[in-house]
Image (cartoon, grey):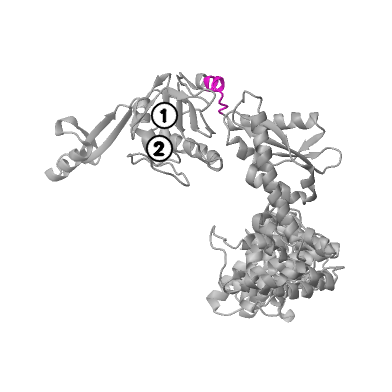
Amino acid sequence: MAELLLELFSEEIPARMQARAAEDLKRLVTGALKEAELDFEKAESFATPRRLALVVDGLPLAQPDVREERRGPKVDAPEKAIEGFLNSVGLTRDQVTEVEDKKGRYLMAVIEKQGQPTADVISEAIPGVIRAFPWPKSMRWGDGSLTWVRPLHSIVCILDGQAVAFEIDGVSAGATTAGHRFMAPEPFEVADFADYKAKLRDAKVVLDPQERKLDITEQLDLYAQDNGLVPIEDVGLIDEVAGLVEWPVVLFGEFDPAFLEVPEEALISAIRTHQKYPMFRDRQTGRLAPKFAVVANLEATDGGKAIVAGNERVLSARLADTKFFWDQDLKAGLASRVPALNEIVFHEKLGSLGDKVDRVGALAVEICQYIPDADRNLVRGAARLAKADLTTEMVGEFPDLQGIMGRYYALKDGEDPAVADAIADHYRPQGPGDTCPTAPVSVAVALADKIDTLVGFFGIDEKPTGSKDPFALRRAALGVIRLILENDLRLPLSTAFAAAGAGADVSAELVAFFADRLKVYLREQGVRHDLITAVFALSGEDDLVRLLARVEALQSFLETDDGANLQAAYKRATNIVRIEEKGDDMSYAADVDTALLSQDEEKALHTQLVQATEGAASALADERFEDAMAALAALRGPVDAFFDEVTVNCDDADLRRNRLHLLSQIRATLDQVADFSKIEGAA
């Protein structure tokens, strides 16, 4: 078995594209191998700033030979039919045989195709892979027609120790590559993947991005341990800087501690966004330390002193700008910025940000009644100031600081801490990993902001479609769900939507939308999606806390023998009634005539149905959902006995009709708890 090594060597590949490109290379090449019926054991891809590489192990040296038998027309078929068959298989009359079976004598072509050498398959396939490569952005250079993310310089393609020859736009494949751009630029030949990886390391190139990330992390940790610091964890930043270097050398610098007067979130955003520097906290205080790291791409002869000095100068200028934004913003109180929101368009059909602030404020105050300890005056004030920091210099430069800077400015202005916290918290939760606000004022404003957005965009028919959700409405709905459930709020959705100005149709659409989002949210908790649908189907059930309690009780009930048996009985009863209603063109959803109950089993079932209906209704009214399920469980015995002993479609028309009414009552009783027809396996 053979090994394939492929390297595509180019100018610098943007860090954000490298991981995807490595996976695409593996996918496209292995796809071509599989299409050519070339099996392999393992494939692994790598990326550095200047190269994509792929190694495929366990390849055969040739495709398997193929033998195919193709049946043709009968030997006495018209000449044109025989000629057409011969043309289709590429054979002459004397190259096909005659075969006889019970249906007669017919022609048989045996086509044998010798497998191509794997090297030939690769030399034909790789140019197609390169030309079809799905870069998000690509370019052309020189006079060629090839497009690549950056100019392509060379190709290494080696199979079983031998170079595979092909050419694409003047770039010939071979066995030669080059090392680090500055420290080892001389070309060298490689024989296989092990040789390639080892020689790259000797040439100051770490091929595996995971190794580069680990190397960077270890250097940061060692410096932190020696200096009483803790690295600020930032996986995304480490991924990015590992994609900027082939030979990571971590250097360390300092900045003026006077800059620490600026809120640390602003400093971190400035340093991370513009400079890509890992940062540290003081191990004792937990506060931001005036230290940073630079991940260089070479071993400087002076030990990196000039690199550090240059980066310290650049960072000082950057932080001076950040401090300037902070100082300028503090000259105007946050409240004075609110009128400027009227000049910012939120959406052409939904008005300005000032309009949105007015709507959110009114809604937040309205829903305070559902949030324990929510002070309406504080909620009103927080809603009014929540978006004001969008007009500041700092947030204009660093949009990721919206809300965060508003909190600092509000505290500087002497606002109540609950108001300041609500300004920072009202955007949250922004994703599954984000914490959910719990402070009453924060919860009120966060809910109002998200509900207003949902009602507004649904009202102008800007709803998510397929994978498209340009206004992040799915995220907003999940945020509302988390705010309600994690704070145990008894806020009916329809009431909240109506308070936000939604009409009946929009409200119904939103309730259905929330049902789908709730399924997504609860999926990881093992809650069945069909049970959520079944409970949501109940008229008026839009209290998420109550709904979830009902779903959990229903799921526990259906996992018991009684529950499973009643689900089957529901299906049986419903199917019988549905068939008979269709055949008779009438409904059997009517009261049972007790005078027509002739058999003990139907009398017992009717008695138990009355008791179960009353018991379940009482329990549901008091939100004793386990008791409601227990009331239904008592139906199992009478239902089983009824189906065992009673003939529904009997000859007596009155008895038949009454028994169908009884079966319909089974459906009605169970549907008090949930719409059982929506439960998988129940219909």
**What count of labels does the image hold?**
2
Residue 384, quarter of the rendered image: bottom right
Is 446 on the left-hand or right-hand side of 38?
right
Magenta residues, start to end: 197-207
Count neighbours of disc 1 (C-alpha within 10 A) and say few if under 14, some if 14 to 19, many if 20 or more: many
Q: Where residue 134 appears, x then y in whole percent?
A: 45, 44
Is 464 on the left-hand or right-hand side of 331?
left
Q: Nearer the viewer, residue 195 or 522?
A: 195
Q: Nearer the viewer, residue 278 or 196?
A: 278
Quarter of the figure with the N terminus: top left
Q: SS at mark 1?
A: strand
**Could you tell me how far apart the alpha carbons at marks 2 and 1 are, in whole angstroms?**
10 Å
Count neighbours of disc 2 (C-alpha within 10 A) and say few if under 14, some if 14 to 19, many if 20 or more: some
Q: Nearer the viewer, residue 566 or 195?
A: 195
2 and 1 marks in contact (CB < 8 Å) = yes
Residue 149 shown in magenta: no
Q: Which residue is mark 2?
A: 130
